[in-house]
Amino acid sequence: QGGKESGPLVEVPHEQGVINRDIKPQNMVVEPDGVLKVMDFGMARLAKRQSGVTQAGMVVGTPEYMAPEQLMGDEIDARADIYSAGCVIYECLVGKPPLTEDKQYTLIAKLIEETATSPHELNAEIPQALSDLVMRTLAKKAADRTQTATELHDLLAAIG
């Protein structure tokens, strides 16, 4: 259901086996206490797919923020949300999503095949360690990304 809140980023939903599948700036809010929350779980599903949740191969989400495996309609897990969170962090750092294109089919091809320019290359004031972590979240293969939201949180805090 849309409008349901999570804990910081997506740690709490992931711990419950829920994948958001549509993390993007428009679905986030910073609370007065500084906690970032994901607000819209309208396209969320359980990590362990149950019949009737979504059809195999069905692609849902916003392409600029979707992991390659999600774009391909492959099975996804929490690491797809890690990729999306990385896209949001990237956009916060450089002012635009990692990869963009006017035509959706060209965008999808670009997202599957190309690697974004690192934030540090676009702005030398962005710390190299932060840039490297963001690029890790944007790895084309899920196995090459941080594996959990908690791990991403801890790595960000260590840079902080």
Image: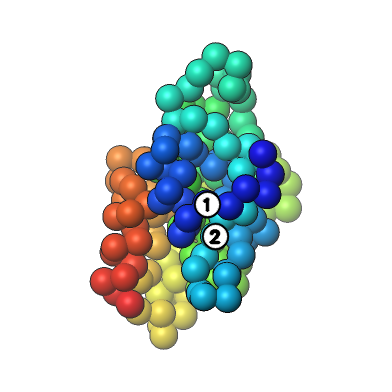
Using the image, determine if residue 65 lies above or below residue 37. Answer: above
Using the image, determine if residue 39 lies above or below residue 129. Answer: above
Task: Report whether 116 appears left or right of 38.
Answer: left
The residue beneath circle 1 is 6
The residue beneath circle 2 is 37
Q: In this rendering, does residue 111 appear at all?
A: yes
Q: In this rendering, does residue 108 appear at all?
A: no
Q: Position of residue 20 (x, y in %)?
A: 54, 42
Name the element at disc 1.
Answer: loop
Three-letter amino acid code of the residue under disc 1: Ser
Circle 1 Cα neighbour tier, 10 Å, few/some/many (<14 / 14–19 / ≥20) = some
Circle 2 Cα neighbour tier, 10 Å, few/some/many (<14 / 14–19 / ≥20) = some
Three-letter amino acid code of the residue under disc 2: Lys
Instruction: Evaluate if marks 2 and 1 touch, with contact meaning CB atoms under 8 Å apart.
Output: yes
Q: Which mark is residue 61?
A: none
Residue at (29, 64) in percent of width and height: 155
Residue at (33, 48) in percent of width and height: 148
The answer to which of 82 and 40 lies nearer the viewer is 40
Kindly give the residue lying farthest to the left in the view shown.
Answer: 158
Q: Position of residue 34 (x, y in %)?
A: 51, 74
In the rendered structure, which disc, 2 or 1, sits on the residue that comes first in sequence? Answer: 1
The C terminus lies in which quarter of the figure? bottom left
The N terminus lies in which quarter of the figure? top right
Using the image, determine if residue 69 lies above or below residue 147. Answer: above
Kindly give the residue lying farthest to the top in the view shown.
Answer: 51
